[in-house]
Amino acid sequence: MHAKKFIAMSPFCVLATSGSDGSVDASPRGGNPGFVHVVSPAQLLMPDRSGNNRIDSFRNIVEGSGFVQLIFFVPGIDETLRVGGTGKLSAEPDLLASMEEFGKLPRAVLSIAVREAYFHCGKALMRSKLWSPETRVERAAMPSISQVDPRPDQSRRAGNQAVVEARYKTQL
């Protein structure tokens, strides 16, 4: 009951997967609060939205163990929720249509068979002061992603931070 409410309030989580070669991927995922749907205590549905167009998580789920771990965050709450289980991908049209957000359908939906769910204490977030306005870093302190991305094809990422942010707004 508490985990379901926490997920409904969460606009952000980190998805971790493991590959067949032992590699691990952790990817940020976000949307409106509750973007991850709780079907039952044993099943979650997470839409896959466009991002950096890497498919590490999907590759790990399809070719690897299928094991997934999620850590959910709720702004202002120091505790986090960890959920573990196995994932399967679906591109079933009705399922995609049910998860439209920002005027767009997801590319796929990750169905997670939940094996465990538990809350982490808030000490790490409290120590980091993650939600504190005094520790907020000004965006200008770091170059734009187009300036730091090491991939050779920068054509879709060219521009300063203002250009990148404008492009993000049209590609959510």
Image (tube, rainbow, N blue to C red):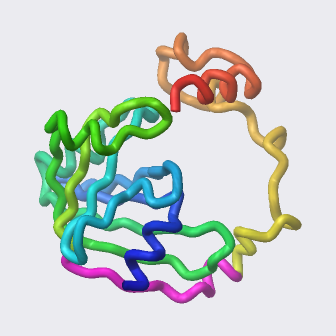
Q: Residue at x 17, y 46 (%)?
A: 89
Magenta residues span 115-126
Q: Residue at x 45, y 67 (%)?
A: 8
Relative to 106, is 138 on the left or the right?
Answer: right
Where in the figure is residue 142, as x and y percent of width and height? Answer: 76, 40
Where in the figure is residue 114, as x and y percent of width and height? Answer: 21, 72
Q: Residue furthest right?
A: 134
Q: Residue at x 20, y 56 (%)?
A: 111
Quadrant showing the N terminus: bottom left
Relative to 111, is 101 on the left or the right?
Answer: right
Asked whether residue 159 appears in the rendered view, the answer is: yes
Q: Is residue 19 magenta?
A: no
Relative to 55, is 4 on the left or the right?
Answer: right
Relative to 153, is 126 on the left or the right?
Answer: right
Where in the figure is residue 57, as x and y percent of width and height? Answer: 29, 47
Asked whether residue 20 appears in the rendered view, the answer is: no
Q: Residue furthest top?
A: 155
With respect to residue 59, does 75 lie above or below? below
Q: Quadrant of residue 127?
A: bottom right
With respect to residue 12, does 108 lie above or below? above
